[in-house]
Structures are given as structure tokens and as C-alpha cells.
């Protein structure tokens, strides 16, 4: 299953956000798109998911243009969880997750054994089995996000796109969701592309980092290759030091701000360079 | 799975999720609707009992009873029944597509468009050959087309349809006002009774086109309604789940417009039914979005019940059914608004 974009131009009305961008998503890996606000990272993800029609260029799934394929067929290959989706008031978790099966169902076949297995499995993977009867709008933020991810899991697509899945979640729930994404990748072999805000989380959870600025890809590769003080400075306009995350062994970014630098107060930095 | 009641057959390979409460509510509403349908036919200068009406329906009993039931009273009851079904179902379609309980066809200008066309036909004297049905259909479709074009910016969103629709609605209301202002007195009188929604003049000639159009549109809405399962999750999620969102919305809107236009042409824009019936049905069933079939049955119960009340409180005046549904519907709308504000959304 390969997903790639060729010469993409993406625009809202007259404002071109992304121009002439090409990308090949590494199959079987977790790719994370990072970049400052309004750099076009969500726009790119939306185009990869056919939520946005490119002005020029194309997105191909296994060599076929996703805009030429029937949308239902795309939905069996490629799942997308948009940013902050809203469920109708009172919709239960079970009902939401069941709707993830839509691309596999027909008018008369709404609950095949495959549907049942997928929904049960998705609820178990997201630890929502006991909450299946509860309305989605009454859940905590973390549970709600897990319910939406469960819907995307039940869709059983080899490729899964997630637009800022950790927004509005507290730290514990952010880690929950990201660990769940890693499970999906490692245990079920799904290709994942997600947009993340937090660079350190991107470094920890990504196999492949795509750094964007002003609608183009600045650089991409493993976190260790990509995340350097120079790149962070170019992409986020922030000076930083990069060290090693003592927990995961991945790059850890420590930004430098105008205040609060240790030498400001005449205190020696312990051990010199961090 | 405990959370869902499901069934699965091997031959034929049919399977699905059952909703016991939905089925129970639909059965009760159908029974109440049928009772009101029969009860409505007992009222008149020649009083009949419910038993006599039912006997006449199955071609038994007194010959004159049968004449009274079939020739005089059934057209009114049938138009009430069908118009209620049409408005209830159309309201459910519009409210779900736009994800907004206020987006019923009588708020966003579809009914107003049909009204303007019919009033223009009567006052300006054109289209007398076309008849009210065709004019209502043209007006409703015209308003819908205008809303769709004005709301279109690389696709439409539910919210924009509501905003543009309210604007179009007021345009049509002023056009209707202008036409009435220059109408002759007897023309205006003929129009005003129709404008509030009226079953008084229903004849078999109204029933025919209405019955045929409903026989096509109601099953179509039920089949196409499958798209609402994903559309109600928002456009992006719906596309992600393989729904052709723009096509689905256009076809569903056209179906809804057809229901409203044929219903309006037959009985006038019966106030608040399309707005209130889906919301009542939603609360009865306890579902997150208005259920199509239950909304249709609720609409029928509201119109038939409203007509019965209209004829009971002022038996000598031909009080239009729309006056009753409006009087009951307006407080309901206010209640809905306060609730929507408190919840911070309009689920």
C-alpha cells in the first residue's frame, strides 16, 4: 500500500497554501508532519485524504489517483480522522464505532460477522468496551478522542491519517492516544500519517518526520536525521538545543527563550554545554 | 455485543442493527395516526361513529355511510395524512443534512418559495393551466435552487444553507406580501386561507398527485436516508467513510424539496409541522438525529390531530389547520430555542 503525492498545489480560494509538493509516504511506518502554524501541514493531510481537491498535481494510492477512484473504495484503503470532529448529541460510542464500517456495508447488510469482529476489536483496542452504551458527548476529552479513533480502527484501512489527534487532551491522554497509534502500527501493520504540534512527541513516536515551512517540505527522514538545531530554527524560528530523550533515546528539543537562560543570571551551566 | 440489538440471516445474507424503541414508537404512532385518520372522518354534518367509518373503509355497512366516507370525507383525511408524512419526513431530512434543528423547510424558505409561486399564479392569473400542484413544485424547487447556488462556495455546508435560506425566505415573504397588496379582494381571500395551511377544500383531485408523488418520494427518502448515518458526523468524516457528500446532500435536498413542494401545493404550508415533528420524534425515540419514518408518522399525527382540534373548537368556522399547528408550534419552537442555547448547540 503506497500513498504518494505528485506536484501538489493546494489553495483556499485565491490563497495558495502549498505549491508543487511531492511526497512518498513510507509504507508500514508512522510518519509525522511537523511545522509552525499555517505552514500547510493540515492542508497537506486533507489533500492526502481527498478532503481537499488539489488545484494541480495528484495523490496516488497504489498508483491510482484517489480522485479518480470511487470514494467508497478509497474509504476501504485509507481512513482519515479530521481535527476535532463533533458527534450528534446523544450518539452512543457503539453507534459511532459501528458507522466506521459504512464503506464495507450495503443497504441490506449492516451487521456482518466481519462488522461485528471489527467493532468489537476496535472497542477493545481503545478500552471502550465498558463505555459502549454511553453517549459520546458525555465522555471525557480523552475517551471521546479514543471513541473517534475506534471508529477509524473499525474502518480497517491499511493506511490511517490523523489530524492532530492529541489536540485538547491533557498529557496523560495525549500519551494514551499516541501509544494506541503505535500499537496500530506495530501490531496491525497499519501505515500512519499524522500531524502533531509537539516536536518532542513527534520525535518520540515517528519513524519518519516530515518538516514543513510555508507550504513546502524543508526536510524529511528519521527523527535523528531531521531534528537538528538548524532545522528547528528554520522551521519554527526558534533557537534550541537538541539532546537525547533519556526515556526513549530519541532527539529532545530544549528551546531557548529570551529570558530564563541560565547564563542570564550569571549562573554557570552545569557541565557546560547541555 | 451487549450495546446493540442485532440480527443476521445466512440466506438471504441480510443483517442489521435493531432499535427496539424506534420500532415500538413507530408502531404506536402508526396506530394513533390511523385512529385520528378514522376519527377525523366521523366529524361533519352527517355524524358517524368510528365503527361506522371503519366498516365503510372495508366496504361494509350502510351505503350512505360509504358515500359520505369515500366521496366527502376521505380526501380531507388522506391529504392530512399524506401532507403530515411529507412535512415530517422533509423536516427530518433537512435538519439532519444541515445538522441544525432550525433548518426546517418552513424556516429556510422552501415553503415560502412554494407559497410565492402559488400566490403569484392566483393573483397574476398565469399558470392557471398548470394548477396549484405544479406551481408549488416550481416555487419550492426555485427557492431550493436559489439557496443552493447562493450557498455554494466550493461545496455547501449546512450552516451556510440555513443562513442563506433564512434570507431567501424573507425575500419570498416580501414578494408574497407585494402580490397580496396588489391583489383583488376575492383573490386575496382565496389565497390567505391557503397560506396558513388548510385542509378544508381538499378533494380527490388533490389526493391523486399527492399520493403518486409520495409513493415515489417517501421510499426514495428511506433508501437514500442511509447516507444520513455518515453525513450526520460532519462532512470530513463522511467523506473519510466513503460517502459522496456533495452528491448525497444534493439528492437528499431534492427529495426533501419534492416532499415539501407537493405537500404545500396540496394543503398550503401547514405551519411548524416540518420543524416540530422531527424534534418530537427524536425525543420519543431517544435518537441523536431525527428518525425519518418516526418523524413522518409524527407529522401525520400532528396534522390530523391539529385538523381535528381546529374543527372541534370552532365547528361553524372553517378554521385552517395551520392556525392550530402554528399556535401549538410557536411555543414549542421557543422551548427548543431555550434548550438549544442552554446546551450550547443545536443537536
Image: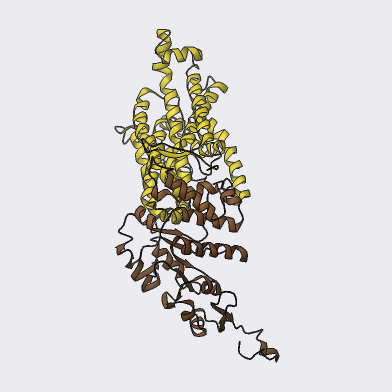
Chain colours: A brown, B yellow
Which residue is drawn at the image coordinates 48% and 82% (left, top)?
A: A231
Report x, y in % for residue B54.
46, 15
Quadrant position of residue B335: top right
Pick whichever, A179 or A218, lies toward us. A179
Report x, y in % for residue A239.
55, 84
Depicted B51 relative to depicted A175: above or below: above
Pick whichever, B222 or B328, lies toward us. B222
Depicted B211 relative to depicted A45: above or below: above
Is residue B133 visible from the viewing direction of this image? yes
Quadrant position of residue A147: bottom right
Report x, y in % for residue A84.
52, 59
Which residue is drawn at the image coordinates 62% and 55% (left, top)?
A: A140
Pick whichever, A70 or B256, lies toward us. A70
Residue at the far top: name it. Answer: B62
Task: Tally the numbered discs.
Answer: 0
Which residue is drawn at the image coordinates 50% and 24% (left, top)?
A: B31
Quadrant position of residue A23: bottom left
Is residue A162 visible from the viewing direction of this image? no
Report x, y in % for residue B170.
47, 46
Which residue is drawn at the image coordinates 49% and 27% (left, top)?
A: B30
Residue at the far front: name it. Answer: A187
Depicted A143 relative to depicted A167: above or below: above
Pick whichever, B196 or A99, lies toward us. A99
Amino acid at each position: 500500500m503506497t500513498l504518494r503525492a505528485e506536484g501538489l498545489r493546494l489553495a483556499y480560494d485565491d490563497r495558495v497554501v502549498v505549491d508543487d509538493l511531492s511526497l512518498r509516504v513510507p509504507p508500514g511506518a508512522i510518519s509525522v508532519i511537523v511545522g509552525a502554524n499555517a505552514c500547510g501541514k493540515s492542508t497537506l493531510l486533507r489533500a492526502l485524504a481527498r478532503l481537499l481537491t488539489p488545484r494541480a498535481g495528484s495523490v496516488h494510492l497504489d498508483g491510482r489517483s484517489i480522485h479518480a477512484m470511487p470514494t467508497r473504495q478509497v474509504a476501504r484503503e485509507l481512513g482519515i480522522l479530521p481535527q476535532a470532529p463533533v458527534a450528534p448529541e446523544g450518539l452512543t460510542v457503539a453507534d459511532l464505532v459501528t458507522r466506521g464500517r459504512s464503506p464495507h456495508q450495503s443497504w441490506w447488510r449492516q451487521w456482518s460477522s466481519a462488522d461485528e469482529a471489527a467493532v468489537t476489536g476496535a472497542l477493545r483496542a481503545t478500552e471502550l468496551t465498558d463505555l459502549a452504551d454511553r453517549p459520546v458527548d458525555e465522555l471525557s476529552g480523552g475517551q471521546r478522542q479514543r471513541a473517534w479513533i475506534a471508529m477509524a480502527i473499525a474502518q480497517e484501512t491499511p493506511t490511517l491519517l490523523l489530524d492532530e489527534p492529541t489536540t485538547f487532551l491533557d498529557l496523560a491522554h495525549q500519551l494514551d492516544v499516541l501509544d494506541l497509534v503505535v500499537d496500530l502500527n506495530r501490531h496491525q501493520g497499519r501505515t500512519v500519517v499524522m500531524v502533531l504540534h509537539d516536536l518532542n512527541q513527534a520525535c518520540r513516536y515517528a519513524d519518519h518526520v516530515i518538516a514543513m515551512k510555508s507550504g513546502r517540505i524543508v526536510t524529511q527522514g528519521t527523527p535523528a536525521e531531521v531534528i537538528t538545531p538548524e532545522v528547528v530554527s528554520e522551521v519554527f524560528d526558534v533557537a534550541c538545543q537538541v539532546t537525547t530523550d533519556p526515556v526513549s533515546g530519541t532527539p529532545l528539543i530544549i528551546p531557548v527563550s529570551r529570558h530564563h537562560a541560565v547564563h542570564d543570571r550569571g549562573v554557570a551551566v552545569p557541565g557546560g554545554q547541555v | 455485543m451487549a450495546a446493540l440489538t442485532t440480527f443476521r440471516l445466512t440466506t438471504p445474507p441480510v443483517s442489521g442493527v435493531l432499535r427496539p424503541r424506534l420500532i415500538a414508537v413507530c408502531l404506536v404512532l402508526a396506530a394513533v395516526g390511523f385512529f385520528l385518520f378514522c376519527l377525523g372522518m366521523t366529524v361533519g354534518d352527517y355524524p358517524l361513529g368510528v365503527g361506522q367509518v371503519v366498516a365503510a373503509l372495508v366496504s361494509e355497512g350502510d351505503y350512505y355511510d360509504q358515500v359520505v366516507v369515500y366521496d366527502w370525507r376521505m380526501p380531507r383525511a388522506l391529504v392530512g395524512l399524506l401532507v403530515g408524512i411529507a412535512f415530517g419526513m422533509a423536516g427530518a431530512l433537512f435538519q439532519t443534512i444541515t445538522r441544525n434543528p432550525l433548518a426546517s423547510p418552513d424556516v429556510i424558505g422552501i415553503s415560502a418559495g412554494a407559497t410565492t409561486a402559488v400566490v403569484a399564479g392566483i393573483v397574476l392569473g398565469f399558470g392557471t393551466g398548470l394548477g396549484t400542484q405544479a406551481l408549488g413544485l416550481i416555487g419550492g424547487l426555485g427557492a431550493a435552487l436559489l439557496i443552493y447556488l447562493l450557498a455554494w462556495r466550493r461545496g455547501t455546508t449546512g450552516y451556510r444553507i440555513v443562513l442563506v435560506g433564512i434570507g431567501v425566505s424573507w425575500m419570498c415573504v416580501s414578494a408574497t406580501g407585494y402580490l397580496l397588496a396588489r391583489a383583488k379582494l376575492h383573490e386575496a381571500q382565496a389565497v390567505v386561507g391557503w397560506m396558513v395551511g388548510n385542509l378544508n377544500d381538499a378533494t380527490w383531485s388533490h389526493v391523486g398527485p399527492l399520493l403518486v408523488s409520495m409513493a415515489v418520494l417517501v421510499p426514495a427518502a428511506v433508501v437514500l436516508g442511509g447516507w444520513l448515518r455518515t453525513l450526520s458526523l460532519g462532512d470530513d468524516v463522511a467523506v473519510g467513510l466513503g460517502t459522496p457528500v456533495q452528491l448525497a446532500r444534493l439528492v437528499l435536498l431534492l427529495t426533501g424539496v419534492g416532499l415539501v413542494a407537493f405537500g404545500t401545493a396540496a394543503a398550503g404550508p401547514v405551519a411548524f409541522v416540518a420543524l416540530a415533528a422531527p424534534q418530537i420524534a427524536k425525543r420519543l425515540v431517544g435518537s441523536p438525529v431525527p428518525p425519518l419514518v418516526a418523524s413522518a408518522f409524527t407529522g401525520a399525527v400532528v396534522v390530523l390531530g391539529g385538523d381535528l382540534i381546529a374543527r372541534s373548537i370552532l365547528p361553524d368556522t372553517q378554521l385552517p389547520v395551520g392556525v392550530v399547528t402554528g399556535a401549538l408550534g410557536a411555543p414549542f419552537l421557543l422551548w427548543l430555542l431555550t434548550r438549544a442555547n442552554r446546551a450550547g448547540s443545536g443537536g
